[in-house]
Image: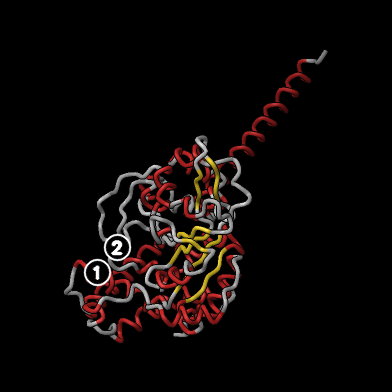
Amino acid sequence: MFTKKEFLKIILVLVVLITVLHYINSTRTQTTSSTLHANSPHKHTSWTDVLREESPDVFNLLPEHFLSEYKSFCWNNKDGKLLCLPSVYLAGMPKCGSTDLYNKLVWHQELVRPVVGKENHYWARSRLGKNTYHLDHTPTPRKHFFSFLQSLGPEKVAGQPALRLVDGTQSMLYDLLGWETRYPGYDRPPYSNADLLRAVSPGAKILVITRDPVQRLYSDYMYFVTETNPNVTAGSFHEAVTLEIGRFRTCLEERDLRSCCYDSENDPKLRLSLGVYICYIRDWKEVFGDNMLVISLEDYSRYPIPTLSRIFTFLEVSQPDNGKLRTFLQSSQKSNIRPRDAASKGDMLPETKKTLQQFYGPYNRELARYLQDTRFLYKY
């Protein structure tokens, strides 16, 4: 039997131990909570749960295993119907020659254009019922996953397992519009579209094409904005650039770069942040690693055959005959070039070009360091 004094000592030790354990557990919880905000979204282990909550129709239809003989991600549903997801994604960027590159890719006999066409905008937009065009904020109906799968056209690869469906949706790389409303309290998106895509097709090949961001922005502005406002000029572009750079820098005073890049309040007419490639490429590279290849429009334009050969090797498809490829390239026309009325606006003003080079320069250098490739410096 314990004496009263010994009993009190034991009680005191137990109280101290309980207090210490409570403190440790509380500290760990606080650290985890802050990590969700401070670290890359890929440290957030519950992003697959986020997708399950947002899109239960997706996970309800996905199989436990894909058909191993198919190069696309295919399976038979409970009714025996073949369904497939693409295994190749040309995920970005807009006005960087992606449409032209996509058309060259699907020329290859093993790379197939889905029935729905180059772009479907499912993962970034219609999965959640969001706008399908960056100048039109009218929401579109949410698209069921089964309808999306049917629109891809699995019959195009049925019985031909070596074929790969190729998705060329540009918005996938950068569009998380509305994340602030969906996840109040977060200071940045808790996941990226890369996380979502990897959750459903972990072995996918991701291809990204970039361009000098200064030229990309002007091309983007003149191509899209002139459709709704034919009176835009190099002068109005300069004014818009000045305002948006100021707004972006103000954002950086309060938030980090990634949060500002994905900010849903960014001007949809002057998509300045899309040229900060490091924001989006880093998100995707952290998820897909060596299954992601980044090329530049400048390289593709100067050396089309070597660049395409490099891409075909990356995609693990056969190398076409160089003579046939050269003949095809010579006979094909460039795709999605600036409309004549937009081209008539001329070049941007010299002062605008200098301002944008100063803005994008540090981000180009960061991207070149990250990819260990000086071709992304653009040498301003």
Q: Residue at x 42, y 75 (%)?
A: 360
Task: Identify the residue at horizontal 31%, vertical 55% (top origin).
Answer: 132
Q: Estimate the x, y position of residue 373 in percent, counting from the top left.
A: 57, 77
Disc with the residue nearer the chain's start (2 vs 1): 1
Q: Left of 32 or right of it: where is 233?
A: left
x, y (%) of residue 189? 45, 52
Q: How is the image coloured?
A: secondary structure
Q: Which image quadrant is residue 331 in?
A: bottom left
Q: Which residue lies under the disc numbered 2?
A: 268
Picture mark count: 2
**Label 2: how many residues lie within 10 Å, few (<14), some (14-19) or many (20+)?**
some
The residue that mark 1 highlights is: 225
Examine the rendering and report whether any part of residue 286 can be seen: yes
Give the residue furthest to the right: 1
Residues 77 and 231: in front is 77
Disc 2 or disc 1, which is closer to the eye? 1
- The image position of residue 94, as x and y in percent, is 38, 68
User: Which amino acid type is marked by label 2?
Assistant: Pro
Instruction: Determine whether, in the image, residue 339 is placed left or right of residue 46.
Output: left
Q: Amino acid at mark 1?
A: Val
Q: Is residue 282 above or below residue 334?
A: above
Q: Quadrant of the N terminus?
A: top right
